[in-house]
Amino acid sequence: MSQPAPTATGGQTYADFYRRSIEDRDGFWREQAALIDWEQPFDQVCDDSRAPFARWFVGGRTNLCHNAVDRHALAHPDRAALIWVSTEVDREIVYSFAQLQAEVERMAAILVSQGVRQGDRVLVYMPMIPEAAFAMLACARIGALHSVVFGGFASHSLASRIDDAEPTVIVSADAGSRGGKVVPYKPLLDDAIALARHKPAAVLMVDRGLVPFERVAGRDQDYAALREQFREVRVPVTWLESSAPSYTLYTSGTTGKPKGVQRDTGGYCVALAASMRHIYQARPGETFFSTSDIGWVVGHSYIIYGPLINGTATVLYEGLPTRPDAGIWWQLVEKYKVTVMFSAPTAARVLKKQDPAFLTRYDLSSLRSLFLAGEPLDEPTATWMAQAIGKPVIDNYWQTETGWPILAVCNGVEPAPTKFGSPGKAVYGFDVRLIDETTAEEITEPGRKGVIAVEGPLPPGCLQTVWRDDERYVKTYWSSIHGRTMYSTFDWGVKDADGYFYILGRTDDVINVAGHRLGTREIEESISSHAAVAEVAVVGVADALKGQVAVAFAVLKDPSRAAGDEAARALEAEILKVVDGQLGAVARPARVRFVHVLPKTRSGKLLRRAIQAVCEGRDPGDLTTMEDPGALQQVKDLVQAG
Ligand code: ATP
Ligand code: MG
């Protein structure tokens, strides 16, 4: 049975809770810090004497792995911790907290045996298999930094990350699998190491038996053999000062070269523990299912660390949302009694193209809510999804940099209505302001558009700096708003009278048509309200007369609707009429073109800048994080055909 969600803060209003997080910052976070274990208490809640750098819980000593694994293994050894499901190789394994701890200790012993010490980096280039989680948690256990790179990333992208992280050890596997097709990783990894300046001391290979691979003598180590060797070895946690770095992770590379985000230990642990209560509302002993990938921030925060820190089991899923059929996720919800799910709008749009009957075939009574983040959640998709599963669908907005939500509805504090199209209000701890780009003044009146910025210091859990580049951290994030030292999200938005924000697109993507500034999101939302459209990307293209015009690329639910020039033109006219009616002629795209697939990053974000570059005949720039190069080719072909 679905139960009402737990409220942790007993009757206080969200407005009070939020105000206190800003006005009594230290008192507020001192309370939240009690959600985790400290080996040694901290002396100071926040040291921002070197602003914009901030240190949280200064002097305190803790450990992410202890909080995510050991403390629960002690209290509830047999409770499920990690539920691995692979529809690629047809296997399911449930690890209890005690079993997870044993595996993590073995992995930690192996890493130590290969020379990994506190502060060293370990690069994880892995498919979605349990050993990837063991490796991340083992790093946290011994104070090494993990740098997870999406499994299957091309050699040159991997090589640049190897050179940036300079890992002592790389953990990898023979192959991943996607849609039943084996994707060999080892040749990509060998090429990447050959290309990189830095050479790791060892490569730890998990052999899944999917594809034979060559071993480099003296460098490549066999995980299974070492695991046997270290089967009974215990590795105590290394207690770390709260500000000790825990990992580095790259942003998605949607707007250019990815930035290496560096995270701390104590602040991140507290932030995640608090978010599980106040935002996601999962209880210890329940099951959380995030459909993300460990290569992305959502995978770090809400597949691995967040749920486990909370004592909640987490599902690690290897496979597609549509294989063996579009019911697979919901089958898992039924089987493992998932209470909270987390996915991305892009995945919801994939499901939208399928028969909704798949979503109602299973018993979803355990499920309380589905959270979506990563891209604007358009109203039609949100409504479709909520109706299909009969549960609340909740948007939340954040970035790799912040590690957890900036904008959300904190139902764990005070239940609040969800407004479709809005990820919600400023989250406690984030002093969010809307800033006018030209005057740098704060916008207070509802409905006026501006940049979403945050007054420093950022709350616990956010990036400490850009890995090995303090200057880039200050210059990129804290110097873009003229005359003010504020953190810029580089997203453009608007706020309503109730304090709900609406994301209008990235500041880079704002389209200026004859002096009217439009967010790509506004036009995309309007186009996707046409029943034939599954997904759409809008970009601004240079125009001699108007400065810029909008051009749209749409994927149809049924591609045959645009088969042939005549049908395509007729549908284009219909869609333009919708935009005219909703936003006015100024927002009307110059063209709506139909494609089978849109260029996206591996984390599911539309690569608008690449589409725009192609439309303007420019070089699309850094495409290392692109999912399917064929998608951009189709755009190129269409543009060239005129
Ligand atoms: P890069 O910074 O390298 O260009 P990226 O910004 O796409 O890539 P991420 O950190 O993965 O990298 O994504 C964060 C961005 O995703 C946000 O800044 C915002 O543009 C978008 N985003 C995330 N969640 C939402 C949401 N709920 N609604 C709208 N946009 C969102
Ligand atoms: Mg970004």
Image (cartoon, grey):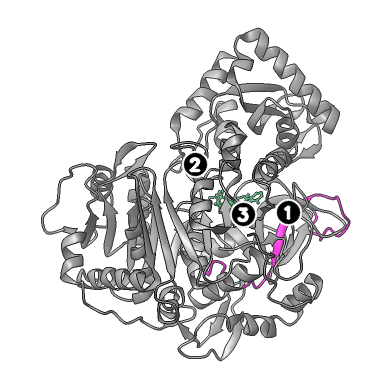
Residue 236 x %, y %: 32, 82
Residue 315 x %, y %: 46, 57
Vertical relation: 37 (above or below) 537: below
Residue located beneath label 3 in the image: 365
Q: Left or right of 546: which side holds 262?
A: left
Which mark is nearer the camera, 1 or 3? 3
Q: Please tell me which residue lies in front, 45 or 517.
A: 45
Tag 3 or tag 1, which sits nearer the N-term?
A: 3
10 Å neighbourhood of mark 3: few (<14), some, or many (≥20)?
some
Residue 445 location, quadrant: bottom right
Q: Which segment did they paint magenta?
A: 439-465
Q: Secondary structure at mark 1?
A: strand
Q: CA distance from mark 1 to mark 3?
A: 40 Å
Look at the numbered discs 1 and 2 and tell me whether their residues touch, using CB distance below 8 Å: no
Q: Please tell me which residue lies in front, 601 or 237.
A: 237
- Mark 3 belongs to which amino acid? Ser
Tag 3 or tag 2, which sits nearer the N-term?
A: 2
- Residue at image coords 10%, 55%: 217
Residue located beneath label 1 in the image: 451
Residue 130 x %, y %: 35, 58
Vertical relation: 438 (above or below) 302: above
Residue located beneath label 2 in the image: 321
Q: Secondary structure at mark 3?
A: loop
Residue 241 x %, y %: 45, 83
Vertical relation: 282 (above or below) 552: below
Vertical relation: 344 (above or below) 599: below
